[in-house]
Amino acid sequence: MRSRSGRLRILGAAAAVLAFALPAAAAPKAAGWRIPTAVRKLPNGLTVVVSEDRSSPTFGLCVVYRIGFRLEPKGRTGFAHLFEHMMFQGTPNAPKGTYDRVIESGGGINNGSTRYDYTNYIVSAPVSALDAILWLEADRMKMLDFSEKNLQNQKDVVKEEIRVNVKNRPYGLFFWTDVAAAAFSKWENAHDGYGSFADLDAATPADVKTFFETYYGPNNAVLAIVGDVSAEEAFAKVEKYFGAIPARATPAKPDVDEKPNTKERLVEQTDPLANVPAVAVGWKLPSRGTPDDVPTAVLASLLAGGEASRLYQGLVKGKELLLGVEGGVNWPLGDPWTYEGPTLLTLFGLYKPDTTAKAVVAAIDEEIAKVARGEVTAAELERTKTMMVSDLYAQLEMPMDRAVALSLTQLFTGDAASVNAIPGKLAAVTRADVARVASTWLTAPNRVVVDRRPAPPAPASPAPASAVPAEAGK
């Protein structure tokens, strides 16, 4: 993800979309709120989604490309992330700095992020800037400045990002990178999406150009516009700026599907920067599109969705084993609605030094076993589902966040309007559904546990010998 200054991108650790301080759409007042959607595909393959919202004279825009960590070429770990940075380095028509300057000088903001199944670029601005921003987005879909100088600059930025967020940070995002590396068997799912320094150093301008030509064609993208513009007006503007961009060969998708694991995987680590121990537990889940998707999301929220959740009440306040707990499906890089290939249900917490990771996992198992036995009250389930619907609506209020949701839904399902079906699917989840997915997926053989403890202090250096001169004659 880029910083607001436009100079640094970091991978957001907690959510797929961010809330920005621009005027928002009116909050939904009742259940059944439906987002208006209109979809059109240009002859070059670019899919366009428009959601009209006249609540303020602004718009949110998202361009999402079907390229993420697990879709990048082997031997190029972190290339999707590196290329996200390269997209902000200018073009032959709009030199470096033009993109940020035009958007920010008009009162807008922009950002970008890379995830397992996609890379997206987001903008929010006054609607008067829509034409200029569409021109900028189309311009960088056509061609970039692939100079050695730009590439080296962004290699250095990505390396610094890795140092800041992983190498020089307590726990170093191990609850994402290390859990995934242990849980998944296929390279596409298991490798570190941040990228190794060696692979980053090996990248050449020719590699970057090939990557762009492979994955950044209009036919490998979805563009969503939400805001103070009609569907027909938006379609006409997109056709004007993007229509002449030629389609490219559609890249082949690797086989990323994996079966559940059949033996528990345990990893022990030490962390010289950590003050207290931490544990992360992950269970492998299948690719999107199964009947268990939504029930598993509800289960994750029931277990770790805030201070009313089972694990917070049971392990933080009750048994006082944990200092805190968080997690979820597709956590920490998104939510249950923003992935396509296999994912994890992950839980993470700092635990007290007078206990052990084994004791924490045993306590988690107890709570999961209760759910699997059907020991969930109707009130508890209803509270969890209501909170999830409320969170979804809150996300969809903001035009930019809604543009992200619609573009990803279109990319993954081929039907942007199906985002409207999520509240109904949540409402339909029963206690039996939650019990079923708990007993099916949250099992010990399908589990990864990473225990990360503070490194023991380095042994003290021996004191230097006393420099007393020997007595004469001895």
Image (cartoon, rainbow, N blue to C red):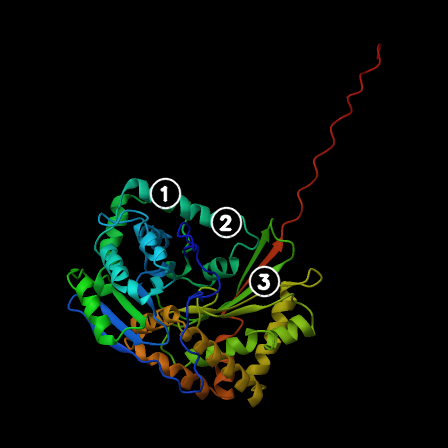
Q: Which mark is residue 164?
A: 2
Q: Amino acid at mark 3?
A: Val
Quadrant of the image containing the C terminus: top right
Q: Nearer the viewer, residue 131 or 408?
A: 131
In the image, residue 356 above or below residue 438 = above
Q: CA distance from mark 1 to mark 3?
A: 36 Å
- The mark lying in front, picked from 1 and 3, is 1
Q: CA distance from mark 1 to mark 2?
A: 17 Å
Quadrant of the image containing the N terminus: bottom left
Q: Quadrant of residue 110?
A: bottom left
Label 1: which secondary element: helix
Question: Residue 271 at what x, y percent from top left?
Answer: 59, 51
Q: Amino acid at mark 2?
A: Val
* Residue where numbered disc 1 is placed: 153
In the image, residue 183 above or below residue 144 = below
Q: Amino acid at mark 1?
A: Asn
- Is residue 106 visible in the rendered structure shown here? yes
Q: Which callout, 1 or 2, points at the residue further toward the start of the chain?
A: 1
Taking 95 as reference, is 312 left or right?
Answer: right
Question: Residue 247 at what x, y percent from top left?
Answer: 17, 62
